[in-house]
Image: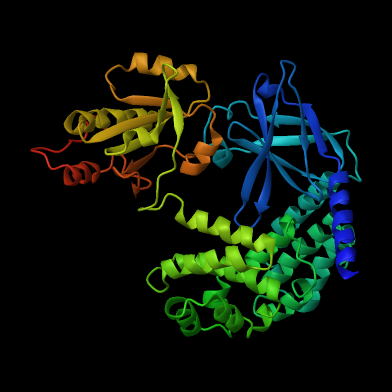
Amino acid sequence: MKKVLIYCLLSIQCIVLQAFKPVVVEGTAAFAKGGKIRFYLYNDLVLQQRKMLTTADVNKEGFFRAEIPVNETCLLSIAYNTNYGSIYIEPEKKYTIELLADEGMLPFIHAEMIGEGIKTKILPVDTAELNYKINRFDYYYNYFWQYFGSNIMSQPPEKYDSLKQLLTNRFPYNPDAIDYYSVYVKYRMAYIDLLYYQKDKEKVYDKYLNTKYIFYNSTAYMDFFDHFFDEYLYAGSRKVTKQMLYQDINEKCDYYKLLDNLGKDPVLRNEVIREMALIKGLGELYGMNKEFSQRNILILLKQMTQISKFKEHRIMAENLINYLLSMKSGTTAPEFSLKDAHNSTMNLSDFKGKYVYLHFFSTYCLDCIREMAYLKQVKDLYKDNIQIISVMLDFEQTKLYHFVNEYKQFDWLFLHFSSNYEFLDAYKAYNLPLSVLINPEGLIVEYPAKSPMDEGFGKQFFTLFPQKEQPKPPQNRR
């Protein structure tokens, strides 16, 4: 009977999940006519890891339409080239939006780092809609910080409460409600309390974290969690000593023992919060390689990906492992298949047995092109031992053909990234100049590699390939 009941409940759950209609997002993007819009969801708001779900073609009138399968409210990231915008989406709803962008920023590969990205405008304006409410709250919240932030933390409790009341009066919310907007406002308010009561974290924990709900998809909740436990294991806990961490990580490498010892801290008595804090803390301790074994930290995280009771934590641990190992010396360089100026496909694995100097550039990066004068010397000196590959990051693929014909003196392999954004993500190629040195076994030697304009560049290659002479810096370094 019990088995039948469980089966019925699971069947009902599956039917409910299947009954969810996908969210429809449609609208216009005048700047992207003839291009593609990409849509991402976050699977980890602590590390800000997002995965691409789908793409939508933008027609010649600038119209696009996409269906997004979600069964809970979450943040949707919308991208064109390397410009990003976002909206909050709720299950089974339809959104009509207008995407706006600074078209002067669109050609830049690192646009997200230096510009405002894509602005999203939801049509028609609805004051009861979630995005409108959050944007309105954020406007006043930021104004509150700008006006009171410099002195609010030094106020006595009565004055502090009255100042904070200015926000809560304008944006009343039910602290026990679990709808997305209420949680958003609550945990933005919680951040103010966190700063004010920073010497009494137990009070803040009891009010905001010692609950039965973990809001993994809430940007405000996860941002608050991230700030609350910033460097907590190493320097913030009174019960977690460095000696205990050293023993449980370096000597015993015991996940269960470590988790059990962390539970002695009142702020870590909640099992779910404790494991989340452990994942974050291990990521921070990994950078202290003189004190804590990086190998053991990776082992502990790997154990979590396999034995954690919480699906979200298994994803977080896996994401953290990938983040810690990404582009590190001694790890395997990500494989790629890219096309040259004549549309022939080349793979990184084609050059096994040789050193590869992977050089990213764009036509608007003048320093990148200046570097090529020095790379020419390296190619001529060590051509039997090294393969130079320059990858163009201009979005228009035809530019590669014109570039190689204009600069025929640069006689090595040139490829185009061909709108392969997974390739950009894998190599973190968002800020130029950037290069990567890869050994004959396909392992990363140095990331980012020394620029040809750096003083130690020639010496490094002279060490790898002893010759009668080493490359000399170009005469005109400007």
Q: Is residue 306 above or below residue 458?
A: below
Of 234 and 119, nearer the camera is: 234
Left of 305 or right of it: where is 209? right
Residue at 69 percent of width and 35 percent of height: 54
Image location (x, y in percent) of residue 174:
90, 65
Q: Nearer the viewer, residue 11 or 30?
A: 11
Coloring applied to the structure = rainbow
Task: Decide if residue 163 is on the left or right side of residue 403.
Answer: right
Q: Residue 412 placed where, x, y %? A: 30, 25
Residue 106 picture quarter = top right
Question: Quadrant where the N terminus lies?
Answer: bottom right
Quadrant location of the C terminus in the rendered image: top left
At x 37% / y 31%, what residue is drawn? 368
Task: Find the residue positioned furthest to the left.
Answer: 468
Q: Is residue 170 visible?
A: yes
Q: Can you give x and y, in whole percent of width and height, for residue 334 in the image?
A: 44, 42
> Relative to 59, is 423 on the left or the right?
left
